[in-house]
Amino acid sequence: MATCWLLLLLWAFLWPAASAVPCHPDDLHALRGFAGDLSGGGVLLRTAWSGASCCSWEGVGCDSASGRVTVLRLPSHGLTGPIPGASLAGLVWLEELFLGSNSFVGALPDALFGLARLRKLSLASNELTGQVSSRLGELTHLILLDLSTNHFFGRLPDVFDDLTSLEHLAAHSNGFSGFLPPSLSSLSSLRELNLRNNTLSGPIARVSFSGMPLLASADFSTNYLTGWLPNSLAGCGELKSLNLANNTLVGTIPSWIEEHSMNNQIP
């Protein structure tokens, strides 16, 4: 019995050392470069990110087996300047990148689209601008993409047939224009779609909603969309919220709207 207690005490003593994840040197170098390229809150970040144990740094998460950085969450840190793409490119295992509610400026760095493992990307509420590259389609593992409340313009790239794992897509409150990309019809895993407050135009029926059986929330309000409400929306059995206000749609209200309203509380 005494031997068992001794073993337990020894394990408790060794456990913190055993569970500590060393920081991969490539990721350590990349994170230091990322913080070094930022102004504003980047000064505080460089102070907070001291030492070489980057897996314990604020906003950083690592894979427990390899020590590779998989998560970078730095929302509302007062970070300013262009997104340091060259430094981010060194985080080759990165799966989650949350940089929302900062003051990043400029276009999306091309290196961002080389992060092939990304599953969640949120850049909402910054000052980013420019057109979104068709290289977005290379991020084939994305389940969440949030580009909302920035200054992006031009067409949404028609690459969503490569992003079929997407569950949440938000690009509202930008300057996106042109027709809805038909490849939106391929988002079979999509649950939330928010494209409100842009200057999107053309027939809403360019998108076949029958390819989105899990869609629960869709917001196209405050655009310039035209035409009849597509019958394919009737096949979205999970639909609970649909906002089409402030467009130039025509025609009668289809009967399935009333059915969905009773079953799913569509306002």
Image: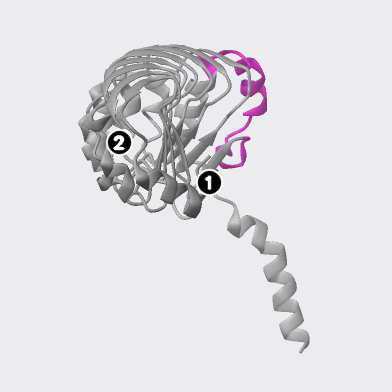
Residue 111: percent from left, percent from top? 32, 23
Q: Which of the 4 image quarters holds residue 12?
A: bottom right
Q: Which mark's residue is nearer the viewer, 1 or 2?
A: 2
Please report whichever mark, 1 or 2, sits nearer to the chain's N-terminal start: 1
State the mark number for residue 156.
none
Q: Is residue 78 visible?
A: yes
Name the residue located 43 percent from the left edge and 46 percent from the top edge.
258
Name the residue located 30 percent from the left edge and 38 percent from the top edge.
116
Q: Is residue 159 visible?
A: no
Q: Which of the 4 image quarters holds residue 129?
A: top left
Residue 62: percent from left, percent from top? 51, 45
Residue type at the position of mark 2: Leu
The residue where tag 2 is placed is 139
Give left or right: position of 264 versus 77.
left
Residue type at the position of mark 1: Pro
In the rendered view, tell whether residue 61 sits above or below residue 84.
below
Quick one: which residue is furthest to the bottom in this view?
1
In the rendered view, tell whether residue 173 sits above or below residue 9.
above
Range of magenta residues: 36-58
Residue 51 in magenta stretch: yes
Specify the quadrant that holds the N terminus. bottom right
Residue 18: percent from left, percent from top? 59, 59
The residue where tag 1 is placed is 22
Residue 209: percent from left, percent from top? 28, 42
Q: Classify mark 2: residues with Cα within 10 Å, few (<14), some (14-19) or many (20+).
A: many
From the viewer's side, name the closer residue of 203 and 81.
203
| Tally of marks | 2
3D distance between C-alphas at marks 1 and 2: 28 Å
Name the residue located 49 percent from the left edge and 52 percent from the top edge.
262
From the viewer's side, name the closer residue of 113 and 10.
113
